[in-house]
Image: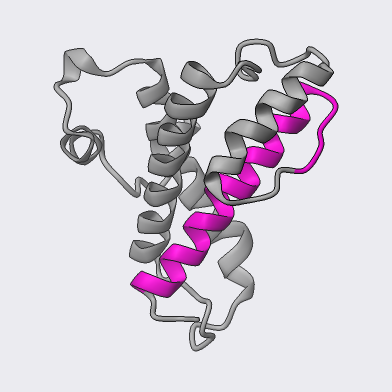
Amino acid sequence: MSEQFKKTYISAREFIISWEKEVYELNNLDYFIFLLINDLASGIERSYFSNYNQNDMLFLPSEETGMLAFNIGDSLQIFIENNCFSVCPLRCPVRFNEKVGIDEQKARRKLLSKLDVCPKACYSKEQCLYSDILNHVLLDCLLDFYNCEMNVV
């Protein structure tokens, strides 16, 4: 019931149009990303930007917060589809509680070296997934958003 009273940053219709899919083509990952975008934008606005002055260079109004959350969701979906469900041998989202073996560490380093970064060592698949999302989704989105959309260097 409380979900009905949350602010919506992107409607289901806008999401489907921006995803360039028909309703019947959407899958569970798409639904998860849709929920994530709205929840993330709400959390950012409520927990983070409530402490900022509106004149601060990093402050984002509600509309831009929704745009940032959308960009993060879009990047997360692309990252998961391209790296977690296809070529990556770790398959972290599927085998979340497993330890990472030496061969898997080498394969991960080789795969992520294509992204022009030096991947940090991780010892569980949960650690690897969190680290990869932080470094290859969140940080990239934040830097791109503030540089391109907000003209903040």
66 up-or-down from 35: above or below: below
Asked whether the viewer can see residue 143, the reply is yes
Q: Quadrant of residue 53?
A: bottom right
52 and 136: which one is in front? 136
User: Which of 141/46 is in front?
Assistant: 141
* Horizontal and vertical percent position of residue 66: 38, 55
- Magenta span of residues: 120-149
Is residue 131 found inside the magenta-colored segment of the image?
yes
List x then y, in percent, for residue 93.
61, 18
Apparent side of residue 97 relative to residue 130 in the rendered image (left or right): right
Rendering coords of residue 151 (x, y %): 39, 80
Residue, x 64% and y 33% (percent of image)? Answer: 110
Q: Main secondary structure of the magenta part?
A: helix
Q: Position of residue 7 (x, y in %)?
A: 39, 48
Using the image, determine if residue 31 lies above or below residue 18: above
Identify the residue shown where x is 50% and y is 81%.
153
Which residue sits furthest bottom? Answer: 55
